[in-house]
Amino acid sequence: MNSEIKVFGEDFDVEIIKDGWNFLDKKKHKKILLPFPTFLTGTHQIENASLALSSIISQNLNLVKENTIKSAITSATWPARLQKINFGKFFTKISKNYELFLDGSHNLAGAATIKEFLQKNFSKKRILIFSMLKDKNCQGFLNEIKDEIDFLISLKISEEPKSRNTNEIAEISTNLKIKNYQAKNLDEAFKKINSLNIEDESLILVCGSLYLAGEFLTKNN
């Protein structure tokens, strides 16, 4: 179609700095200094934002001003993509020194993103509340992140016939040498975490399925 092709890392790129990041348009020698996204976690989201910026600049959309761009990026939200949970039923159940995140990733690319996120939080106890559908690569997903987990609590996604049962997930986790427990539902999973009386700073990540993420968001109110 004779369309112009732009490739991340070649025609445009990002540069991470102390208080934010620079968007770099290498052909037009344009640089835009931006703060870190306020709500979106992970360096991959900065790369996603740079793609949007490259599209704007490519079309010479002068009506979109820099302060508008900055405002949009810092207010963008994406539920169940390393979403930090700061309120709701389950948030009230956890200790004050815990952080709670939700992610719906269910493939190996998503596992790589989660691994990077967990690695950056290596100083905390890292707890997974986990479930996955039968047609997803549970073994490969957990193998990617196994070294970044202190323990895992498996559960079955309620009212979802394609959900793996907890015994399957427990067996995979045990074979990968991931310390694990089983729970009947989200409420029981959070009770289990509290019963362990972990005093260290901890991070709880609910992940493995968008179906699980949807259930969490509904029940968390």
Image: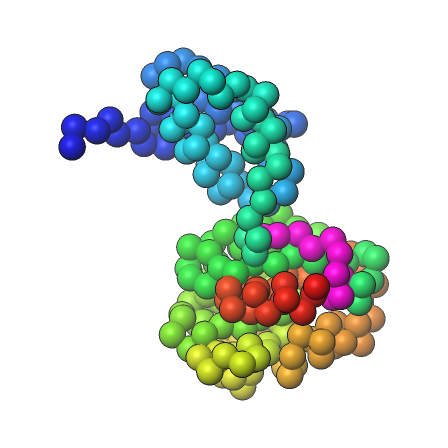
Q: Position of residue 54 (x, y in %)?
A: 40, 27
Q: Is residue 23 above or below residue 174?
A: above
In the visual, does 55 lie left or right of 202? left
In x, y percent, where is residue 137? 40, 70
Residue at point 57% right, 79% down? Answer: 158
Q: Is residue 147 visible?
A: no
Residue extending farthest to the front is: 63
Q: Which of the pair 146/188 is nearer the observer?
A: 188
Q: How is the image coloured?
A: rainbow
Magenta: main secondary structure: loop
* Residue numbers of the magenta segment: 82-91
Residue at the image position 46 percent from the left and 63 percent from the top: 106
Q: Residue furthest top?
A: 29
Image point (49%, 59%), residue name: 105
Query: Can I make out residue 155 in this image?
Result: yes
Relative to 2, 153 lies left or right: right
From what the image shows, is residue 70 above or below residue 135?
above
Number of numbered discs on residues: 0
